[in-house]
Image (spheres, helix red, strand yellow):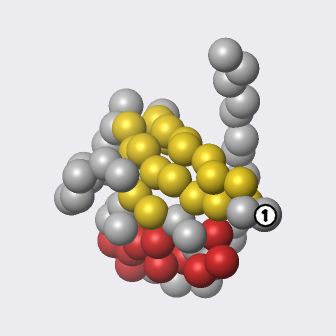
Amino acid sequence: MTNYYFQTETIFQKPIEEIFSFFSKAENLEVITPPHLKFKILTPLPIEMKKRALIEYQLKIYYIPFRWITEITA
């Protein structure tokens, strides 16, 4: 099995409390993902966003289904 590590950075023009409140809710991943990707969280909600939390989801890229597990590391 191959593991990949992706990291990104974004700068927001809002108070950190407002940003954290939005991104700390896993269900908002569905809100920010383009609809054509058919993104669906498989892990039962609500998910507590904390270190070592796992989120399993599925999506489609060019009609190819993918299952993905994300681990919150920080």
Q: Along the line of sight, which residue is nearer the eye, 58 or 16?
A: 58
Residue at figure coordinates x 56%, y 70% from the top left: 38
Q: Position of residue 53 (x, y in %)?
A: 34, 38
Query: Neighbour class for label 1 at 10 Å: few (<14), some, many (≥20)?
Result: few
Relative placement, left or right, of 65 versus 2 is left
Label 1: element kind: loop
Q: Residue at x 37, y 31 (%)?
A: 52
For the point 71% across and 54% down, the residue is 64
The number of callouts visible is: 1
Position of residue 43 measured from the top left corner of the image (x, y, whole percent): 31, 48
Q: Quadrant of residue 56?
A: top left
Q: What residue type is disc 1 on?
A: Tyr
Image height of 69 relative to 36, above or below = above
The answer to whether residue 19 is left or right of residue 62 is left
Left or right: 28, with 49 as reference point: right
Residue that lies at the very extreme toward the top in this rendered image: 1
Please identify the quadrant where the N terminus is shown: top right
> Where's residue 22, x and y in %?
39, 74
Q: Which residue is mark 1?
A: 62
Residue lying furthest front: 63
Pick whichever, 12 or 62, lies toward us: 62
